Image (cartoon, grey):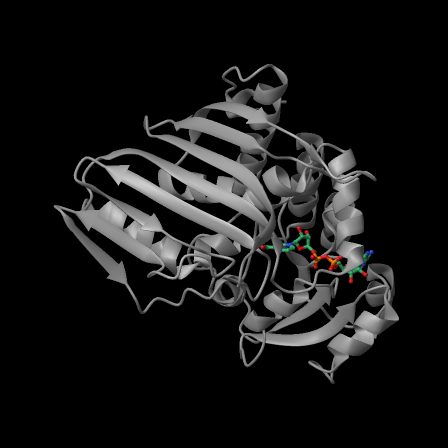
């Protein structure tokens, strides 16, 4: 790819102006690296609502209408429903625009192949943003593990509880496409939100050689099948093993400014352990990162542990990347395919009764 960094603000369009726009937009506010030139959404209410943030931007009901307008666009922030990612991203790349796509990248490997081929054919960059990799407490966890402070890593564990009460409002439109995803076997906990957890595993400990999974279903009727209780375990190529358990607290309350997910990460080493106590929601009211070594517990009290900041920093990283070409994309499209393979291996394993599946070999 013959990418040349921009020597001026990146002319950007937002494609999809729904719930997650509220967080993705944080990277663009007061950022001299970007100039927001257009907003696209079929909903007139959404367009009118978001125009308030960008009075100078033109609004359009479709990607085709923006393309036909003649407005010059360098890159887009693709915040489409997950069901539209593959076709939508190919359409965006075919316009000659770089794309920063929300997760999950897409549902299967043929779709991923189409997206990668479109990026290559159009000589454009496709990034699949992963805001969790910009969540400061997780950065601190990685730093502690890599410093050797807790000794050689023995293993690690992630936990997620989807909580029924609290948090911000999620529009019905978002549930509608999530239900379509459920019908396609791509559940809201393991695939949609799980994408983040699987990403952090790859980011912390590298490539994975075996996955074993037991994916359950809890049905709430009318096509609402939540993919819990679920347990997934895996082994990295470096020998470190990880595990993730996913459950629901249907009647539980969780204080949160965003979604009501109670999440933890804990890495055990020969000398001690380090853990992240919360992420999206405000569950455990202890420091967001704690380290236990030699009989002493140390807490980090001054981290930016607002989950929303991870969107700001992920988006700023993308815009800086377009201006400089420096550093990893977090994630490149190829790295996102590794996350997809991880999820697909979990499905294959669970369907086969929990046998080991090599994610590098799924098709
Ligand atoms: N990183 C995270 O933690 C996180 C959290 C939530 C959602 N997401 C992801 O963000 C994406 C959007 O989710 P959301 O919750 O905002 O959904 P949403 O339903 O609230 O918003 C989607 C928006 O896209 C619009 N849209 C539909 N078809 C369109 C088209 N052809 N062109 C332009 N716009 C179109 C809809 O009108 C709606 O406004 C999904 O991929 C989702 O998985 C990521």
- Residue 361 appears at what percent x and percent y? 55, 20
- In this view, the residue in front, 136 or 282, is 282
- In this view, the residue in front, 81 or 224, is 224
- Going 77% across and 77% down the picture, which residue do you hit? 49
Left or right of 321 in this view: 168: right
Left or right of 139 in this view: 310: right
Left or right of 352 in this view: 87: right
- Going 42% across and 43% down the picture, which residue do you hit? 203
- Residue 161 appears at what percent x and percent y? 53, 45
**For residue 158, what is the image quadrant?**
top left
The answer to whether residue 220 of the structure is visible from this angle is yes
Picture layout, residue 332 above or below residue 246: below
Count of numbered circles on the image: 0
- In this view, the residue in front, 150 or 12, is 150
The answer to whether residue 362 of the structure is visible from this angle is no
Q: Quadrant of ligand 1?
A: bottom right
- Quadrant in which the C terminus appears: top right
Picture layout, residue 80 above or below residue 107: below
- Residue 63 appears at what percent x and percent y? 82, 60
**For residue 58, what is the image quadrant?**
bottom right
Picture layout, residue 11 above or below residue 276: below
Which residue extends farthest bottom? 55
């Amino acid at each position: 790819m013959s990418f040349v960094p921009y020597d001026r603000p990146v002319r950007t369009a937002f494609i999809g102006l729904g719930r997650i726009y509220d967080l993705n937009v944080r990277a663009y506010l007061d950022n001299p690296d970007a100039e927001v030139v257009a907003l696209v959404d079929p909903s007139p209410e959404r367009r009118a609502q978001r125009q308030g943030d960008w009075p100078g931007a033109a609004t359009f009901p479709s990607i085709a209408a923006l393309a036909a307008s003649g407005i010059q666009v360098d890159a887009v922030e693709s915040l489409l429903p997950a069901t539209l990612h593959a076709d939508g991203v190919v359409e965006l790349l075919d316009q000659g625009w770089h794309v920063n796509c929300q997760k999950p990248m897409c549902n299967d490997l043929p779709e991923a192949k189409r997206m990668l081929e479109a990026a290559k054919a159009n000589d454009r960059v496709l990034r699949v943003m992963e805001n969790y990799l910009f969540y400061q407490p997780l950065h601190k966890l990685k730093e502690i593990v890599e410093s050797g402070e807790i000794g050689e890593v023995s293993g690690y564990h992630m936990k997620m509880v989807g909580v029924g009460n609290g948090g911000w409002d999620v529009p019905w439109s978002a549930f509608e496409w999530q239900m379509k995803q459920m019908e396609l076997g791509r559940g809201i906990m393991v695939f949609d939100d799980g994408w983040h957890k699987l990403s952090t595993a790859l980011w912390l400990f590298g490539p994975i050689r075996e996955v074993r999974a037991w994916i359950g279903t809890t049905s709430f009727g009318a096509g609402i099948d939540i993919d819990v209780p679920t347990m997934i375990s895996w082994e990295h190529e470096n020998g470190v093993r990880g595990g993730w358990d996913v459950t629901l607290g249907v009647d539980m309350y969780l204080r949160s400014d965003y979604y009501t997910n109670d999440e933890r990460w804990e890495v055990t080493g020969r000398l001690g352990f380090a853990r992240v106590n919360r992420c999206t929601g405000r569950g455990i009211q202890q420091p967001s990162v704690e380290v236990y070594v030699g009989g002493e517990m140390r807490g980090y009290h001054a981290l930016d542990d607002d989950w929303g900041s991870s969107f700001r920093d992920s988006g700023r990283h993308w815009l800086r990347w377009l201006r400089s070409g420096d550093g990893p994309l977090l994630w490149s499209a190829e790295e996102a395919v590794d996350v997809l393979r991880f999820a697909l291996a979990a499905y294959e394993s669970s369907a086969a009764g929990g046998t080991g599946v090599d994610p590098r070999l799924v098709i």
